[in-house]
């Protein structure tokens, strides 16, 4: 840390020195270095003024440009002059006095080639016609040629004005030559390669050269203008600081004009300083060496020691000696030597410290230096800055990290709820009703009762007095429960949107962390925030993540953290006073597992159940989402059809279908979304993507076709079964090799089913396998899912719905319904056997019923199967064409939506396959009605198992085996 501070101080000094060297002759800028720099950095007007001064100052003191840039002062150096007998006379002020020459025998050290010499001074005499500047060398022909090539390349693509400037620059370079030092450095770089030190030097020299050129240009222009107005400028003094101050105020103003007419030099000093500072820092980081030169012991002795120029010596790392000289003395004795520059030093290597000490001792004895004035020698262990950084870097980082984290922790603690590192802060997102929440009740369709319930919360937040004046306590919160995607979050948002209050949304799982105590702390923080923002709504989604019944949790070890989070919620909800307008809404898919304490009045006192939408609800939801897409269909008709085709779909499913339909239409580059696109989208959502890449063998295809035809015929001829809408043998990504779709009676909203409907549905489900038995000499594995469904239905008939006289009117919960049933069957062994027998009997009855029908309709099965093989998909109208109208009357709304199949046009959007190939018994002309479509069989009322297509999954495995 100290090193860094010293380095910074060192840099500031160096930069200040550069600044001072820039403004030496202007009295107004003769500030002490830190003040000069600080004042420059502070005000932009200073900077611009300084830029002007910079140019003017340079004008009057050209010599400055020749001054080598100051070298940064080393970290340690402070030269204290010690005079010796051999020291030359001090003549700092007398610049006319000739500097002392080099020591006898040491002249070679100060020759042009010597490392101790600065650049040779120009003789001042130039051959006639030579316009080369002093200290500059003329370019060789070869160099000129190379430069021309480079400039030609640079000019390509440049605007012509810039190219002209570049040409001018080149001409000037040719005329005036380039600084000798620059050329030497370029030569060094070419011969010895580029190093950071050389790059820095190059940069300095080039900048210097650019500055000189700019100054020269300004001078030329000024001279030109002055020569045009010789009278006015005869007494002009172009020195900086004099402008506007002369006796004749107008003169200064004139000069200003003149100056602004000439050239505007944009020199951003603050940027320049900043860049220089950063570049210097980087440079020092990368190249931790100092500005130094190596000499031999003999050179040291003859040139410095014998002349009494040595101030002190520092032995570094026991192998090298750094020599500190009396700079003033060196400057007067060897004015050209770089050793007179601050920051520069010589060094020489030593074999051993003892030998070195002996040598110095001998030398000083020979020079008869008194003991009291002997040259001090110190010893120093030194690593490079980079090494130091490597050594201390990790420690500094570690300390920094601790500091940062403790600051954060302190910040959190300041908030009261922070806990360590802000862990305990609530992660709830706060939505602003004005900007973020745009949802209104109008956007939530198809849950009128739920909306009504929750409206009360809105009126509480809007007009609390209305309730309070009657002494009514306002409900504290409501739990919105229902299957996923039914719009619970949407409803909560709409409540916030309608009431126009802030809305804090958080998920239950966000309270749970691996750290103990974080959950309750977050709950506290959330409620504290809410209290600060009253009136407001807190919405905790998936509250079952923390609100599970504690009795259930404790089983198997429990979860203390979760429990204490729940306790904290209970406490916080109790903690509101009745006038605090904070409403807590919570969403869950599993209201049944929630802790009873949560549900008691005073906490979540309302329980709002949101079911999957009914047919009417689906229509309304479609209406909401259809607004967002472009369709030219008759909306009323479209809504009715798609709503009928999507029984059991949640609001989220519907939103997805509408979006899918738009995507399907976009794929065809259509300009509006059509009914057919919706059908495809529904099919895709239900059955998954078509898997046309799965090529079935002809036998497999035939089996699938007869299997599906069996289902289709049952659906067509059983009175209480669901009327068929579509049958397909195109494999699906879900694994189904084919499927039949039915329009569920009651449009999917049916809540009750009678025995007849149950039996017909079971028989229809077995239709696939029975058809295989009747048409092939062996059966396949493809019907296992059908059996699963049939068995499940039959079991429920026996154990839950009292549809078996033998078992009677009892209800046996299964293991998912009761934890007791997980370990112990709720019936005796005898009853179990009786249940098995009854289930078997019912399934057998369904089988017999199915077989009877399919034997009767064997020919029809064949017709449908062959047509299916040809077309792959058959719609309702195809069935009517092949089999004639269904012998039973369809429900009214069904007919309304899907037509009677009589003459409504084969091209209708819900029409099945476009071109029949196999004429049915009724001939191709008959029944080309515009009906068809797709939906799945319904569940058995609400909460019953999801209806599923006839999954033919197992067939796939079999097909694979065949292929092998
Ligand atoms: N009744 C509805 N009206 C309009 N859109 C709805 C409706 N229900 C659901 N949606 C659509 O479904 C999306 C998802 O709904 P939401 O997030 O509210 O479901 P959720 O019941 O909270 O689901 P989860 O239980 O999985 O959290 C909504 O953004 C909206 O587009």
Image (cartoon, helix red, strand yellow):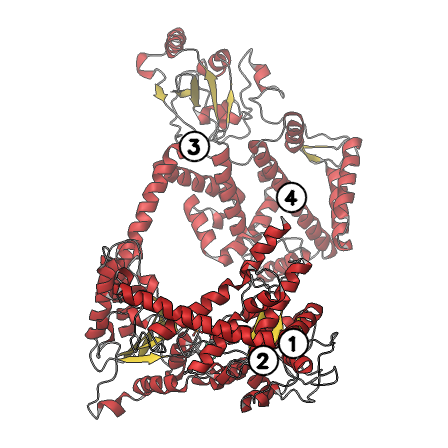
Q: Which residue is denoted by mark 2 in the rendering? A: 716
Q: Which residue is denoted by mark 3 in the rendering? A: 385
Regarding mark 1 in the picture, which secondary structure is present there? helix
Regarding mark 2 in the picture, which secondary structure is present there? helix
Q: Which residue is denoted by mark 1 in the rendering? A: 860
Dot placed on the residue nearer the N-terminal end, 3 or 2: 3
At which x and y percent is residue 198? 59, 32
Q: Is residue 807 visible?
A: yes
Kindly identify the residue that appears in the image at 22 percent across and 85 percent down.
Answer: 473
Real-space Cα distance between discs 3 and 4?
33 Å
At which x and y percent is residue 952? 55, 63
At which x and y percent is residue 861? 63, 73
Dot placed on the residue nearer the N-terminal end, 3 or 1: 3
Residue depth check, mark 1 versus mark 4: number of the one nearer the observer = 1
Real-space Cα distance between discs 3 and 1?
94 Å
Real-space Cα distance between discs 4 and 2?
95 Å
Kindly identify the residue that appears in the image at 60 percent across and 39 percent down.
Answer: 203
Q: Which residue is denoted by mark 4 in the rendering? A: 210
Real-space Cα distance between discs 3 and 2?
90 Å
Residue depth check, mark 3 versus mark 1: number of the one nearer the observer = 1
């Amino acid at each position: 840390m100290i090193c860094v501070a010293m380095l910074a101080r060192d840099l500031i000094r160096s930069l200040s020195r550069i600044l001072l060297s820039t403004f030496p002759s202007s009295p107004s800028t003769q500030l002490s270095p830190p003040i000069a720099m600080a004042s420059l950095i502070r005000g932009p007007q200073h900077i611009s003024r300084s830029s002007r001064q910079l140019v003017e100052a340079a004008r009057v003191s050209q010599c400055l440009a020749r001054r080598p840039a100051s070298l940064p002062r080393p970290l340690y150096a402070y030269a204290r002059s010690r005079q010796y007998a051999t020291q030359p006379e001090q003549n700092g002020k007398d610049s006319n006095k000739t500097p002392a020459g080099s020591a006898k025998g040491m002249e070679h050290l100060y020759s042009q080639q010597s490392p101790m010499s600065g650049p040779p001074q120009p003789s001042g005499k130039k051959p006639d016609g030579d316009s080369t500047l002093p200290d500059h060398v003329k370019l060789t022909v070869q160099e000129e040629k190379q430069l021309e090539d480079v400039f030609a390349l640079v000019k390509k693509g440049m605007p012509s004005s810039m190219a002209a400037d570049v040409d001018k620059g080149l001409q000037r370079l040719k005329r005036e030559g380039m600084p000798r030092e620059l050329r030497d450095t370029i030569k060094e770089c070419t011969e010895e390669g580029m190093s950071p030190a050389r790059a820095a030097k190059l940069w300095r020299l080039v900048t210097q050269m650019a500055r000189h050129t700019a100054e020269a240009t300004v001078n030329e222009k000024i001279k030109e203008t002055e020569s045009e107005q010789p009278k006015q400028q005869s007494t002009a003094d172009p020195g900086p600081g004099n402008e506007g101050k002369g006796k004749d105020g107008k003169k200064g103003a004139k000069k200003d004009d003149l100056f602004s007419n000439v050239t505007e030099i944009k020199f951003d000093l603050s940027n320049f300083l900043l860049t220089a500072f950063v570049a210097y820092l980087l440079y020092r980081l990368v190249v931790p060496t100092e500005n130094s030169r190596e000499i031999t012991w003999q050179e040291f002795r003859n040139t410095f020691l014998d002349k009494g120029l040595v101030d002190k010596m520092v032995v570094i790392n026991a192998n090298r000696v750094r020599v500190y000289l009396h700079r003033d003395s060196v400057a007067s004795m060897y004015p050209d030597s770089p050793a007179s520059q601050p920051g520069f030093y010589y060094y020489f290597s030593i074999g051993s410290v003892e030998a070195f000490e002996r040598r110095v001792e001998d030398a000083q004895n020979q020079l008869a230096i008194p003991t009291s004035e002997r040259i001090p020698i110190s010893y120093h262990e030194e690593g490079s800055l980079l090494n130091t950084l490597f050594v201390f870097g990790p420690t500094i980082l570690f300390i920094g990290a601790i500091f940062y984290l403790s600051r954060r922790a302190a910040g959190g603690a300041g908030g009261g709820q922070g806990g360590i590192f802000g862990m305990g802060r609530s992660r709830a997102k706060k939505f602003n009703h004005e900007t973020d929440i745009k949802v209104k009740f109008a956007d939530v369709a198809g849950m009128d009762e739920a909306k009504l319930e929750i409206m009360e919360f809105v009126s509480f937040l809007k007009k609390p007095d209305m309730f309070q004046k009657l002494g009514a306590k306002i409900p504290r919160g409501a739990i919105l429960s229902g299957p996923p995607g039914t719009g619970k979050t949407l409803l909560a948002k709409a409540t916030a949107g309608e009431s126009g209050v802030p809305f804090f949304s958080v998920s239950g799982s966000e309270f749970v962390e691996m750290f103990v105590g974080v959950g309750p702390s977050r709950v506290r923080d959330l409620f504290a925030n809410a209290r600060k923002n009253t009136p407001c709504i807190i919405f905790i989604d998936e509250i079952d993540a923390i609100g599970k019944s504690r009795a259930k949790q404790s089983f198997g070890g429990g979860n203390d953290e979760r429990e204490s989070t729940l306790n904290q919620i209970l406490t916080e909800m109790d903690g509101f006073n009745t006038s605090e307008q904070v409403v807590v809404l919570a969403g869950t898919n599993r209201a049944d597992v929630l802790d009873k304490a949560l549900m008691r009045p005073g906490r979540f006192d309302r329980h709002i159940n949101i079911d999957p939408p009914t047919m009417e609800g689906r229509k309304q939801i479609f209406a909401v989402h259809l607004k967002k897409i472009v369709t030219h269909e008759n909306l009323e008709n479209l809504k009715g059809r798609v709503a009928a085709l999507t029984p059991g779909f949640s609001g989220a499913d519907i939103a997805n279908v509408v979006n899918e339909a738009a995507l399907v239409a976009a794929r065809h580059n259509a300009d509006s979304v059509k009914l057919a696109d919706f059908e495809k989208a529904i099919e895709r959502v239900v059955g998954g993507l078509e898997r046309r890449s799965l090529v079935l063998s002809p036998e497999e295809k035939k089996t699938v076709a007869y299997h599906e035809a069996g289902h289709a015929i049952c659906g067509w001829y059983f009175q209480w079964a669901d009327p068929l809408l579509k049958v397909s043998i195109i494999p699906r990504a879900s694994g189904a090799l084919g499927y039949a779709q039915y329009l569920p009676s009651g449009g999917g909203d049916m809540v009750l089913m009678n025995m007849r409907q149950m039996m017909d549905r079971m028989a229809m489900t077995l239709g696939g396998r029975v058809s295989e038995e009747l048409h092939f000499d062996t059966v396949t594995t493809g019907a296992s899912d059908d059996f699963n469904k049939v068995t499940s239905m039959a079991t429920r008939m026996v154990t839950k719905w009292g549809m078996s006289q033998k078992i009677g009117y009892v209800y046996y919960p299964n293991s998912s319904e009761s934890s007791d049933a997980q370990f112990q069957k709720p019936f005796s062994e005898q009853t179990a056997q009786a249940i098995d027998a009854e289930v078997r009997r019912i399934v057998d009855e369904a089988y017999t019923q199915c077989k009877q029908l399919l034997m009767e309709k064997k020919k029809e099965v064949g017709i449908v199967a062959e047509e299916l093989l040809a077309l792959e998909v058959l719609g309702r109208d195809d069935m009517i064409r092949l089999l004639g109208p269904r012998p039973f009357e369809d429900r009214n709304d069904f007919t309304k939506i899907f037509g009677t199949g009589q003459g409504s046009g084969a091209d209708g959007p819900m029409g099945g396959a476009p071109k029949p190939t196999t004429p049915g018994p009724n001939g191709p002309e008959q029944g080309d009605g515009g009906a068809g479509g797709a939906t799945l069989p319904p569940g058995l009322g609400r909460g019953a198992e999801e209806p599923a297509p006839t999954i033919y999954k197992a067939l796939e495995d079999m097909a694979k085996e065949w292929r092998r």
